[in-house]
Amino acid sequence: MKDIDFMARAIELAKKGQLKAQPNPMVGCVIVKNKKIVGEGWHQEYGKDHAEINAIKNCKKRFGLEKALKIIAGSDFYVNLEPCSIEKNTPPCSNALIEHKIKKLFCGTLDPNPKINGRGVKLLKKAGIETKVGLLSKECKQLNKIFFTNQKKSRPYIILKSAQSIDGKIALKNGDSSWISNPESRKDSHYIRSQVKGILVGRETAEKDNPSLTVRLTKKELGIGKNQIFDQPTKIVLGNFKKSKKNNKLFANNAKIIIGSRLSAKKSENLEYIEYKGKNFLGKFLEDLLARDISSILVEGGQKTLNTFITNNLFDELVIYTAPIFLGDASIETLSLKAPKSIKQSTRLNKVKIERFKDDLKTTYYNANI
Amino acid sequence: MKDIDFMARAIELAKKGQLKAQPNPMVGCVIVKNKKIVGEGWHQEYGKDHAEINAIKNCKKRFGLEKALKIIAGSDFYVNLEPCSIEKNTPPCSNALIEHKIKKLFCGTLDPNPKINGRGVKLLKKAGIETKVGLLSKECKQLNKIFFTNQKKSRPYIILKSAQSIDGKIALKNGDSSWISNPESRKDSHYIRSQVKGILVGRETAEKDNPSLTVRLTKKELGIGKNQIFDQPTKIVLGNFKKSKKNNKLFANNAKIIIGSRLSAKKSENLEYIEYKGKNFLGKFLEDLLARDISSILVEGGQKTLNTFITNNLFDELVIYTAPIFLGDASIETLSLKAPKSIKQSTRLNKVKIERFKDDLKTTYYNANI
């Protein structure tokens, strides 16, 4: 096995923390001595041991404490993210590596958290440990795209979503949109919902469409055990939302809703209003959502809300399901943006993923890289 | 080998006639005796021998005339299309099969040509030859989708094509559309052009955009020999087109143009006007194009022209290239159709093919089956 194979294994281990590590990043660690893996670990749950510590524990379990200490001394560590240099819920990992007298650290990327960024590596270098940063860096960043976006852009990772006809319409003029996309597409969109911490809609959609904004998948479909609890994403409304009988589905099961608006409506139970002065509060609202540990959101429309996010370049992915129907000129368009001055001056999104669900097409456009 | 394997081979042979058989269908024939192939042939060129005759000739070449006659007597014929029962450029194939005393005919589908449809099979039955119709019928129809459409709908096979932005726009308000799609997509669209007999645009597009409407691919890209001549598709304009210096590219290399319109403009060289009374002449115009051996057309816009074809349900494929850019609200929409009364009542196209060219997406929607 080569260096990149060990790092690929670290990434593989990291992914096991996908459901529980948030808002922490996913991290995996592989300890190698004489080209053989002698310990493996990953960050399993927010607030619990980091990957490096778990890998050391794993080595000790494999070989016994005394032998393990000898093995770890002079070994190489492969970690997808820079070891932390600060104490938060657990002691800093850099210290543990120094104490265990490791020989070399390979890490995929530096920690984008400005409080760490490079400090962990610096500490190790000072202690005479070799360091190599950048192994499979693209893959390591991709793995923690949510965490990198949170740290670098001080906002949640943002996915915009829409279901439209061939001619780019999301509903008839009378608001009818049931259903444009097929059951398979709609199930897929529930999988997207299950992977974010919050689902956001605009005030009009929340008031008129009476959406539930819940993940409606079985535990089996979610890949979790019968006794595990799935935390529904937080419901979020952009704009001065008013609770009424017409939008009662939002409040089913005592769900709480965060509302970001200029003026707050009458306070009521289960509604957290965040009030802003001035019109352009979206950036601040997103910061405030991140401060509430909402590290990723899915924006489900309507048209005005999607426009606002795109116009302000506040999105990381744009997901469009296209169904093989025509909805005509009088229907409501998916987007209504400003035209560029020329086609050359229009922004080209730099990456596209294409999937299909029967005769529906799913296109995921990725915005600028992290 | 099983029956379907022999039929699959007949289809494979038929495809060799793709470039030269039109407006005839592609036909392949396999002669089988004692489960072994003893002769193969295909319809190589319009006006020349049909597949059955070529397969018989091939058998005679393999075994010598005398032995071949003995082999063919009592043999099974596999043909993707019903043998013809009428004499056009060549004697009817049914007669040849009877004369050669074959035992059984397997054919993929009946000939959709109303003058033949079932008559070829009937002749053989009368002569005591077993017949089985319907082997790989779907594949056989698909192979000759152009021919089937021509025969059943009395019009060319129609492909609509457009290149658009994510938000469904084909040009800026000032007409700028260079270039929405990337070079790879544009090359692919030249491949589509190379496979049709005519390229149609609306009057406005022809007058304002000054298009060439030619296939710009090398002979190597077209898969033809250095000494072979590639016949450019016929240029067609829908509406009362006026020749001017602004649209001179259409006339390069002395190209001829067919124009279908209510009133014809001043006659001029290289323009064939077909005049119609009344507004709704598109159906009749398409019939007239087929009568001129234009068995397939590519419709390249603009918006009004695409609308007309879709509104009248006069299309077999809708090809949309989507580039990862936004062109905004003020730009020109790809389509502008009438809205259905409800989403349930909207027509769903029943088959979609998805391809990609770098970050451009190509979606091909197939309309009702033949």
Image (cartoon, coloured by chain):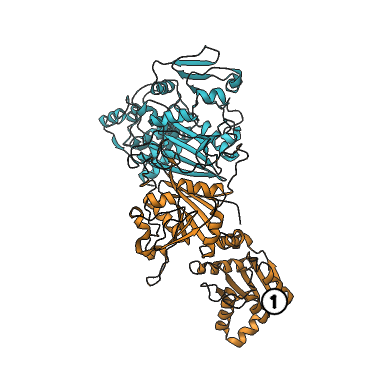
Chain colours: A cyan, B orange
Residue A250 rendering spot, x and y as whole percentages:
57, 22
Q: Is residue B341 left or right of residue A289?
A: right
Compare residues B159 and A270 and report the one nearer the observer: B159
Q: Is residue A358 left or right of residue A305?
A: right
Instruction: Tell me if residue A16 comes above or below residue B22 in the rendering.
Output: above
The residue that disc 1 covers is: B103
Residue A7 rendering spot, x and y as whole percentages:
39, 41
Q: Residue under mark 1: which chain is it in?
A: B
Compare residues A165 and B61 and report the one nearer the observer: A165
Kind of residue indicated by mark 1: Lys
Name the quadrant containing residue A115.
top left
Residue B85 rendering spot, x and y as whole percentages:
65, 73
Q: Residue at x 60, y 21 (%)?
A: A246
Q: Is residue B84 left or right of residue B254?
A: right
Instruction: Tell me if residue B4 comes above or below residue B238 in the rendering.
Output: below
Compare residues B50 and B304 and report the one nearer the observer: B304
Compare residues B338 and B42 and report the one nearer the observer: B338
Q: Could you tell me which quadrant the C terminus of chain B lies in?
A: bottom right
Q: Residue at x 52, y 48 (%)?
A: B308
Q: Secondary structure at mark 1?
A: loop
Task: Let me know if residue A63 appears in the view.
Answer: no
Name the quadrant containing residue B339.
top right
